[in-house]
Image (spheres, grey):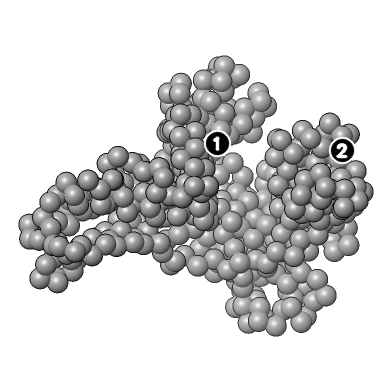
Amino acid sequence: MFLRNISTACKRYSVIKMFLSPFRNIAHFDLDTFFVSVEQLRNSKLIGKPILIGGSNDRGVVASCSYEARKFGIHSAMPMWKALRLCKHAIVIKSDYEAYSKYSKLVTDVIRDAVPLVEKASIDEFYIDLTGMDKFFGCKKFTDELKLKVNKESGLPISYGLASNKLISKVATNEVKPNGQLQIPFGNEKLFLAPLSIMKIPGIGKETGFKLLKMGVDTVKVLSEIPVELMQNLLGKNGTELWRRANGIDESPVIPYHEQKSISTENTFQQDTIDVNFLHRELVRMTEKIGFELRKQDRLTGCVIVKLRYSDFETYTIQKSIPYTNADHILMKTVQELFAKLYERRLLIRLIGVRFTNLIPGTYQINLFEDTQEMIHLYQAIDHVKKRFGEKLVMRAAGTRI
């Protein structure tokens, strides 16, 4: 097969690729309605039906929905009760953390084994730097082969955009979903973006979009023609960046994906202790601390490790693989369960530690399948306060030191 035969050669040329091409070739791959597609793969009777993935109660939110459901105006993060009011015959499916994580890892392995440089942007999307390959194999042919390979080995539909930078490739992918592919030749970036709505540009949210629409700026072409100085006066630094994006300019690199990075914290006590209540409070405090660090870095963890050192310096660790998350209430439950299994000797404890590994890029909303709207807003409010005034300003009572 074409892809299999050239994958090794691709990696060999990756070191010198920047010298082989006058411009970059960046592919953006995105799994189509990922959570829904996994459920349809497991149950073919769901194909073609309006599907809602998320909280099964009225206070839950929609984590993902099928294209059939979107026709009724339903979108992710919408309250479940509102979605069911828009589409009464929609099928609500309780999310399966383990299945989604499993398929994400499968697709990641397929792509990473075939390409020289890949960035995992979230649980279901990837950027691939193919710069230089056009001199030898043809980037379009390669991405077509890789798309087929992912579909064959995972059973999941995937779309891609191929362009000279990450911005254009992502926008191109969104234009051809589901199960599509689109190449934007070098030099055609502005021509491609021109007729699109300004809301298609990453980084333009509701507030900025509304402000621009009130000014009569509705297409990317109009936005690109506004003097950059005026954009800077209107929106500050963000205005300059939006002007660059409207003109198809993006030099951001594809950042290699490293799965083994970790975030951790540990505490060596001044006096060895056997106070279980104190130990549990410390575990809550430590988990909350590095859980916030995960969300601040827009990362999810797939493995939790608890470390314990007794007064005789004997050290033990225990770990558990979990579906990707960065939600404190899920992480704390796992940490406490692991500690209960680990603490068996009933000796004085000198040190405890918590570590999160198998990190991938991702935002908190990805994992809020069963949370209520109140829980979502609570996390967002707490993180906002911590980022602005310091993480110690707001803490769980269960983790405070008495």
Task: Locate the N terminus by quadrant.
Answer: bottom right
Q: Amino acid at mark 2?
A: Val
Residue 182: give x, y in percent of width and height: 77, 53
Q: Is residue 47 visible?
A: no
User: Residue sitting at 65 percent across and 55 percent down?
Assistant: 29
Judging by the rendered image, the residue that carries numbered circle 2 is 217
The foreground one among 291 and 79 is 291
SS of the residue under disc 1: strand
In terms of sequence position, does the residue under pointer 1 or pointer 2 come before the other? Answer: 1
Q: Amino acid at mark 1?
A: Ser
User: Residue sitting at 43 percent across and 26 percent down?
Assistant: 56
Asked if 306 appears above or below 35 in the picture, the reply is below
Judging by the rendered image, the residue that carries numbered circle 1 is 64
Query: Dividing the picture into quarters, in which one does residue 261 lie?
Result: bottom left
SS of the residue under disc 2: loop
User: Residue 7, which numbered label?
Assistant: none
Asked if 115 appears above or below 184 in the picture, the reply is below
User: Residue sitting at 62 percent across and 78 percent down?
Assistant: 11
Using the numbered discs, state the Cα–Cα distance from disc 1 to disc 2 in whole angstroms. Answer: 30 Å
Q: Residue 183 vs residue 49: left or right?
A: right
Q: Exactly how many numbered labels are in the figure? A: 2
Residue 291: give x, y in percent of width and height: 40, 51
Pointer 1: residues within 10 angstroms few (<14), some, or many (20+)? many
Pointer 2: residues within 10 angstroms few (<14), some, or many (20+)? some
The foreground one among 371 and 94 is 371
Q: Residue 388 vs residue 243: left or right?
A: left
User: Residue sitting at 83 percent across and 34 percent down?
Assistant: 213
